[in-house]
Amino acid sequence: LFSGRVEFLLSAPQLKHLPDPDYPEIAFAGRSNVGKSSLINALVQRKAIARTSVTPGRTQELNFFEVGDPTQFRLVDMPGYGFAKAPLKVVDNWRKLVRTFLRGRVPLKRTMVLVDSRHGLKDTDREMMTMLDEAAVGYRIVLTKADKVKASELEAVRSKVEEEVRKHPAAYPQMHVTSSEKGMGLEELRAAILSDIRE
Ligand code: GTP
Ligand code: MG
């Protein structure tokens, strides 16, 4: 499935632009620059179907991608959070868009919460997890950019994050470790996504 048809569907800057809720959806959330768009590209084996950037805050809308022929599910690239230089109005818009989407989106099967392997959980990630707990949307924690840290460092961050994630009711206890650059953990994550959309 992941190596077959993948198509950009639309970009929704506001809730009124959302596509009809016709297919199961998997959303990708996380701080700006954590690697959401890169992970989507790596999962579907495309170089740039989702736009990536070295500048944080690249993705400001909900971007929908369709996978499968005929369509089997959608991947949703969410705008990043925690961008220090974001104007207040942008942050407000983000919160409203994301919160309402998470609370009311019937076909949303799972959210992937991406966390940088170098940094672990930040307060904005905690806010995101609480938002998901409250919306009762199940989520998986995905450590990104694992190629950037030493194995020992990765283990330390991983166990610290795991301990905290266990206290969140809607979070999966076991995490995924990935590198979009090196292709690490992708096959396992694809399998998890396929099982999530069938739930
Ligand atoms: P926003 O859209 O701003 O929220 O960012 P994003 O989370 O979509 O991040 P994006 O995928 O644009 O990646 C940000 C930067 O991190 C880019 O320069 C990527 O090349 C880099 N990057 C992403 N994934 C990896 C990875 O696995 N390893 C390494 N080394 N770099 C990565
Ligand atoms: Mg992005």
Image: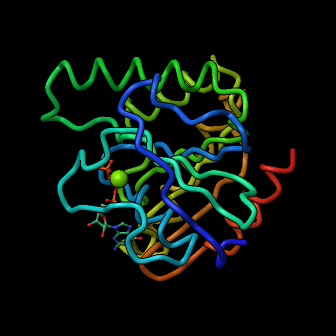
Judging from the image, the colouring scheme is rainbow
Compared with residue 23, is residue 96 higher up or lower down, i.e. above or below? above
Residue 166 on image: x %, y %: 68, 36
The picture quadrant where one finds residue 23 is top right
Say which quadrant the N terminus sits in.
bottom right
The picture quadrant where one finds residue 137 is top right
Say which quadrant the C terminus sits in.
top right
In screen coordinates, is 88 left or right of 60? left
Residue 127: tell me if it is visible: no
Residue 97 on image: x %, y %: 42, 23
The picture quadrant where one finds residue 71 is bottom right
Q: Which of 34 and 70 is in front in this view?
A: 70
Q: Residue at x 54, y 68 (%)?
A: 178
In screen coordinates, is 195 left or right of 163? right
Residue 12 on image: x %, y %: 41, 36
Q: Residue at x 25, y 50 (%)?
A: 58
